[in-house]
Image (tube, rainbow, N blue to C red):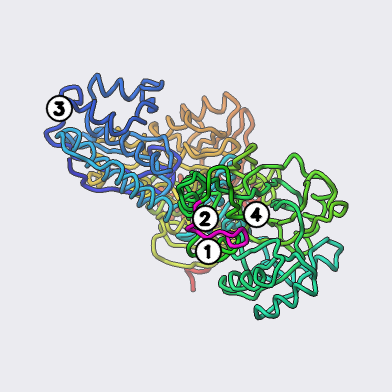
Amino acid sequence: MAIRRMTHLRGPNIWTYRPVVEAIVDIGDLEDYPSNTLPGFYERLTAWLPGLIEHRCSVGRRGGFLMRLRDGTWPGHIMEHVALELQTQAGMKTGFGKARMTGEHGVYKVVIRTRHEAVGKAAIEAARDLVMAAINDRPYDVVATIARLTDMVDRQCLGPSTSCIVDAASERGIPSFRLNDGNLVQLGYGVAQRRIWTAETDRTSAIAEGISRDKELTKELLSSCGVPVPEGQTVKTAAEAWEAAQDIGLPVAVKPVDGNHARGVSLNLNTQAEVEQAFTAAEAEGSDVIVERFIPGQEHRLLVVGGKVVAATRGEITRVSGDGRSSVAQLIDLQVNSDPRRGAEEQFPLDIVRVHDNAVTQLELARQGLTADSVLPIGQSAVVERTGNLCVDVTDQVHPDVAYFATLAARVVGLDVAGVDLVVEDVGQPLAAQGGAIVEVNAGPGLLMHLKPAVGRARPVGEAIVQHLYPAGQSGRIPIIGIMGDQGGPNDALTAKLVAWLLNLSGKRTALACADGLYLGDRQLSSQSAVNWDAGERMLMNRTVEAAVLQTSVREVLTNGLPYDRCQVGVVTAMPPHEGLADLYVHEADQMPGIVRTQIDVVLDNGASVINADDPEVAELARYSDGEVFLYARSERQEAVRAHLAEGGRAVFERGTEIILGKGKERFTLLDLAAAPYATLAAAAAPGRTPAVLAAVATAWAMGIAPELIAAGLQSWGQQDAQAALQ
């Protein structure tokens, strides 16, 4: 099997609303050999990938794909399912896939949903190799392949904290797209956008983040506002650390001033040797060191979002139990690091415990008279870690007094999203009564401990952050008008420019990407054709944009997809010819409606579709619209228009030289083209352009622009062009 090419469709496309990788696969002679004719193939494939049992396929139930496999299906279809399963095993579960013939013998389009282009393409290539190995009864290292894909997912896909916010936004219908190769993500479009970077938002100020990194400054501010904090001193040397410990009173805790994840933190220190060793461990983290009063109790992390505690976890002391033959280091690997929740990457809620290169763990063992090489007898246990094991959900136990001080601490520092660390015996009791204290306030807190607690239920922290950024009723959307029809030609450009002009007049700063160039308000940014995905995304990234008019073409839909997930108004002006699209396996005119309907499929429920009723194939697309349908035509006697108006629908048409708005039985004369400066310049001077004007009028009407403003806007737009032509 040969993969001729792979295309990443980044936006809504002919297959689905979401990004996919589309591969052109030539299966060659295998077109004559469905799976049920290949001896041993079924057994080898299912032994390598037992998870295929979960694939429902077109049968619609568990095991459906395996039924197809036994009955006989072709390698292109099998590649689709294998690629999806490889992605799932690599930690990127996506369920959508398609395999369709192209019309060329043995050549298929294999399509899979993917969250990352490189991972999706690698999964398709691996699927090809795996299927061929199973067909030819050759060895194939499935484990190594999944490990390689897993590494790609870990390194290149969004981290779990960011993903949970993005997924929560998606559930709310809020669009999003990635702004870099890391975890910087834009939610929403244009002026309605917000940005997140892991658990930090664009409401997280640099000053607040700087304060949170300075633990001494944080404590000073908290203390001045009445928040209980442990007394402490910043020190430069081990000797100073011991002096501070004596001033504060033993026992003490020693930690880096600028640290996170409990690295370099030592607790309950009672001797000079312990304090000095702890200083060395904290200093190794690369910042100043603070010595503070030890607070007895358990470590807790409260997540504060928008002034509310939305989740809380409690830490646990990590211990190992002796077996009489294994060293402490071996016991740590056997009993602690074997926990599937532990790992070095962000998707693991707990860190790997390292003993040989971790001074804090070595100090903890030394205080118990042990080293990493000590062998614990049966029945004896040892503490290996006191901090950093936040894994027990206690959200429902948090006392209102504790929640009050946690939210106050976040406000004092200035963080909209904060991880507030406190030590307390019982989180269900008031803070001061039990001598508890807040020890840290962290910006950009990890969310995984709340998503995957070892004990208790997961908390909807992503939803809380999205609700904070977008209170109920806010969608993160701006009006987007998508226009398709004449393959990116001049008539659609005229419609787009008119619509953008009318939106600007209505008070919305409007971005325009069309065949004539790229515009923002009344300023032209580029004179080159902007009928492409990149131009559309560029406009939707702009924080000043309040509305966007984006022209597209069939070729763009087939090679990139649409640059937006949904639109307020979708306009189809014509059914383009299929000629010139053979390189994309479009050979027949009857393929075109299935492609063009993409523009209608993405119309929002509360939006509208604007349809050229004079083109019968375009008129047929109206039935796919989730929103209201506006028709336009040269005459109200057009059959589709008459039927639409009879049902109470809205339409725009000509009556002589007048443009008429119709709704049900009502008629309203918008403008007499013969009397308008615009008509002389554009419509009359360029025969055949009037339908573009009708489309623009219908679109503006669908956007809720008052007819009087539409009429005035058409005339003023024409006058501007006339003045420019005379200069």
**Frontmost residue, 11 versus 49:** 49
| Residue 499 counted in the magenta span | no
Packing grade of label 3 (10 A; few <14, some 14-19, many >=20) is some
Q: Give residue 206's quadrant in the image.
A: bottom right
Q: CA distance from mark 1 to mark 3?
A: 59 Å
Residue kind at label 4, given as amino acid type: Ser
Element type at marker 4?
A: loop
**Frontmost residue, 285 versus 383:** 383
Mark 1 highlights which residue? Answer: 358
Q: Is residue 105 above or below residue 425?
A: above
Mark 3 highlights which residue? Answer: 33
Mark closer to the observer (3, 4): 3
Looking at the rendering, the stretch of residues picked out in magenta corresponds to 365-375
**Frontmost residue, 22 versus 282:** 282
Q: CA distance from mark 4 to mark 2?
A: 61 Å
C-beta proximity under 8 Å, tags 2 and 1: yes
| Lower position in the chain sequence, tag 2 or tag 1 | 2
| Lower position in the chain sequence, tag 4 or tag 2 | 2
Q: CA distance from mark 4 to mark 1?
A: 64 Å
Mark 2 highlights which residue? Answer: 353
Q: CA distance from mark 3 to mark 4?
A: 62 Å
Mark closer to the observer (4, 1): 1
Mark closer to the observer (2, 3): 2
Packing grade of label 4 (10 A; few <14, some 14-19, many >=20) is some
Residue 483 lies, in percent from the top left, at 46, 47
Residue 460 lies, in percent from the top left, at 64, 41
Residue kind at label 1, given as amino acid type: Asn
Q: Is residue 66 above or below residue 78?
A: above
Task: Determine which of the numbered discs, if any, sits on residue 506 in the image.
Answer: 4
Packing grade of label 2 (10 A; few <14, some 14-19, many >=20) is many
